[in-house]
Image (tube, helix red, strand yellow):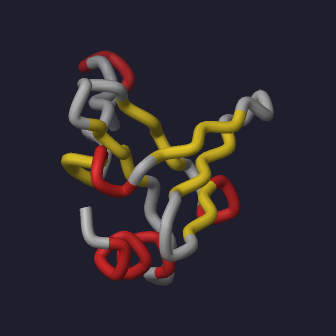
Amino acid sequence: MDMKALQGIFTRRPYQPHEIVLDNGDRFLVPHPEAIFLNEFIVVFVEPDGEIHLLDPEAISEVRRPPRRRKPARERT
């Protein structure tokens, strides 16, 4: 994926969570902008538990908004 497109997605304000999908099917939920770092060659994603993933931008097939969770019928107001 184009690095400029990624920068546009992850610097947009107000920030909204996004899911990164890799060519191999791996998925990473980016809940806040401090969890991702971009430079011209690599994407660094830090999981909430501190695990670090180095991602090749060319291996990113899609960045999308995660599916919204629906409340069970009895909890809806």
Residue 74 position within the rendered picture, expressed as x and y whole percent measured from the top left: 32, 16
Q: How many marks?
A: 0
Q: In this image, 35 relative to 73: left or right?
A: right
Against 58, residue 74 (above or below) is above
Which quarter shows the C terminus?
Answer: top left
Residue 30 position within the rendered picture, expressed as x and y whole percent measured from the top left: 51, 48
Q: Residue furthest front?
A: 41
Which residue is rendered at x = 46% and y = 70% of the image? 10
Which residue is rendered at x = 29% and y = 48% of the image? 60
Q: Nearer the viewer, residue 67 or 3?
A: 3
Q: Quadrant of residue 39?
A: bottom right
Against 2, residue 55 (above or below) is above
Against 49, residue 29 (above or below) is below
Residue 61 position within the rendered picture, expressed as x and y whole percent measured from the top left: 20, 47
Q: Residue furthest right?
A: 50
Which residue is rendered at x = 50% and y = 79% of the image? 11
Q: In this image, 66 relative to 11: left or right?
A: left
Q: Nearer the viewer, residue 68 or 74?
A: 68
Which residue is rendered at x = 49% and y = 83% of the image? 13
Residue 53 position within the rendered picture, expressed as x and y whole percent measured from the top left: 60, 38
Q: Quadrant of residue 28?
A: top left
Q: In this image, 45 relative to 29: left or right?
A: right
Q: Nearer the viewer, residue 38 or 29?
A: 38
Which quarter shows the N terminus?
Answer: bottom left
Q: In this image, 71 relative to 1: left or right?
A: right
